[in-house]
Image (cartoon, coloured by chain):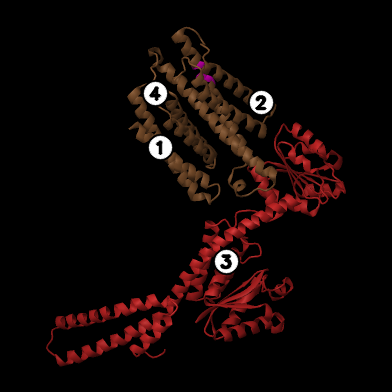
Chain colours: A brown, B red
Amino acid sequence: MELILTYLALLFYLSASLAYMGSLIARPGKLLRAAGILTRVGFVLHTGALAVHLYQQGRPPANLADWLSFYAWATVAVYIVTEVHYESKVIGSFAIPLVVLLLGASAALPKTIETLSPPLKNFGVWTHVILTLLGNAAFALACCGALMFLVQEWLLKSRHPGILFERLPSLKLLDDLCHFSLTLGFPLLTLGLLSGVLLSYSVWGSFLSWDGRQIWSTITWVFYAALLHGRLAGGWRGRKAAILSIIGFCGVVFGFLVANLLIRGTHAF
Amino acid sequence: MEIIVLGLSHKTAPIELREKLHIPESELPEVLEELGGCGQILERMILSTCNRVEAYAVVDDVEGARRFLVECLAERHKLLPQAFESSLYLLTADQAIRHIFRVASSLDAMVVGESQILGQVKAAYAIAIEQDATGSILNALMDRALRVAKRVRTETGIATSAVSVSTAAIELAKKIFGALTGRTVMLIGAGKMSELSAKHLLADGVGTVIVANRNFDRAVELAERWGGRAVPYDHAKLEMVGADIIISSTGAPHQILSKADFQEIALQRRNRPIFVIDIAVPRDIDPAANEIDNVYLYDLDDLQGVVQANLRERQREADVAEGLIDREVRQFAEWLASLHVVPTIVAMRKKVESIREEELQKIFSKLQDLTPEERHAISLMTSSIVNKILHEPTTELKRQSALKEGHLYVDVLRRLFGIGDE
């Protein structure tokens, strides 16, 4: 059941992606409306899949496949919020393909079930997981905004704007979107990490066990803290901020995929 | 009965001639009335803009109507027909319908996709209606033309992108800043071009205008007009830090702002974007300034390049629109053709009906003792026989009327049923 729902959701996200990307070259009106509906249907199905997963297994994501699926879900959630907030659906042409990649990778990965040590099945774990997920999802969106910013900026600088230029939103909106996502994601990530530290103390009696995941999370946290500080205090905006947002997100993904495969610890799945 | 278009446009006549033949809106009612005096012209309207003077009419005799129209035009403008006849085009039937659809949809315009023409067509049509100069055919045609124009606008991208330098500049500004409300624009040099661009920007909500000019009095004059601020030319660089959009158009023979100047300005603006439009020839600003982050520099050639690209894009969309118009013309022509058969169908029914009535009277006078109910039943039966027999020829005739050989069917039917010409 979970599998069917996941595949269905993936199918809807995939069609939504095609519609979103098509809207960049063809007439956007109907395509964007369709894409919006497809995304929401996909989201409902995806939510269903995760609900079934939780009901059956009763625990947080425990392997890389689950993680990616939850991550994709959180990204769609944050995306829908921003789409409504900015009344601009074009962002979806970058965000939803990314979701397809995440969920596609999740579906392709083996679902090995690792046992989670019993003390980790409590409310604290959930707080930790949900907060860090949503925080990272906001960073994914910031990355999409940044990519669109760079494309639009390049088109403007080239002085030969074309149809794509016309379809993409203004630099101002894209920069605002980046900023909004960062200011949304950073506190979430901070709280997520803090809850993780407290959790670690309550379970193991030490704040940090310095596994790969924790080290990497701290690095990304410091990176985003610096980026946000630069934006607010140093007037970093536009191109420079966009590039840093993309690097930050690459770091998040790197942490997900590579660090976990190489380094084993309490976060290993 | 034929739909015709007679007129001239920017495609066939130079502006001098169009000016001479232009009919001001205030004179249209008079002209329409004059045209009504011609027995050949059944329905009429006049469209007169700076790019075209055209008469749309439903006429009985095309040649007669043409002669009358040309004479009218010549007399009104005190010209010899020879002076403009070679620029005139006369379109009939499907070609006329297509032309009217294309004009209303702005496909025949000088700048394809410009929006003014639709309003002008609407106004001309309204005047014709007011003068009672139109009838069922021209009304149907113009209603359809306005609907087609709306379809073209919404279903193709013909009117989406900017096709003049100043609107292109505004479009670019919006892609940088989003809404322009509250932004500051600064004019360096106060020439005609920068004045025009500033006017457009103000109409789009730009908040503050700063004017710097070598001739300070002129700067003050312009600034006052827009409720802006004039600054001494030597302070221009300082003031640029506060400006989001800069329009430079001095008559200076050399560059007045270097890349380094803009590096400094960008730094002081803390990387808030700045849009610089250099419309001076020779250029005021070092083109290399475009390489600086958050500085977007466009010169006149760049803007014209954007306009050209947009025009090409419009042309592509116009091709899509032509396909749409093709279908609409076909539909309207079919409807029009079906009108021709209506009199024939009516005549055929009348004839058969009269035969039925006659025969009923005969039989009723022979069978005197029929009850009213029986009479009614017989009458019903005959009428249903008539309807059933006529059903097939009627529908087939309507169907054939839309096709090329439709008139043959009308002729044959008229002969077979012995219906004379009306």
Image side of residue B151 versus residue A171, left or right:
left
The mark that comes first in sequence, 2 or 4, is 4
Which residue corresponds to the image point at 13% horizontal and 84% vertical from the top-left?
A: B371
Q: Residue at x 18, y 81 (%)?
A: B376
**Residue at 57% from the left image edge and 55% from the top image edge:** B157
Residue B245 horizontal side relative to residue A208, left or right: right
Q: Which residues lie in the magenta part?
A: A190-195
The local secondary structure at tag 1 comes to: helix
Q: Which residue is mark 4?
A: A112
Q: Chain of mark 3?
A: B
Q: Give the chain letter at badge 2.
A: A
* Marks 4 and 1 belong to one chain: yes
* Residue that label 1 marks: A9
Judge if badges 3 and 1 mark residues of a common chain: no
Q: CA distance from mark 2 to mark 4?
A: 41 Å
| Residue matched to label 2 | A230
Q: CA distance from mark 3 to mark 1?
A: 46 Å
Q: Front-most of B366 and A210? A: A210
**B91 up-or-down from A190: above or below:** below
Question: Tag 3: residue type?
Answer: Ala
Mark 3 neighbour density, 10 Å: few (under 14) some (14–19) many (20 or more)? many
Query: From what the image shows, is residue B344 above or below residue A30?
Result: below
**Is B77 placed above or below A152 here?**
below
1 vs 2, front mark = 1
| Residue B234 at x, y percent in the picture | 86, 40
> Callout 4: few (<14), some (14-19), or many (20+) C-alpha neighbours within 10 Å?
few
Q: Which residue is mark 3?
A: B104
Circles 4 and 1: CB atoms closer than 8 Å? no
Q: Report whether residue B37 is seen.
A: no
Q: Is B63 above or below relative to B210?
A: below
Q: Which of labels 2 and 3 is toward the front?
A: 2
Q: Residue furthest left?
A: B369
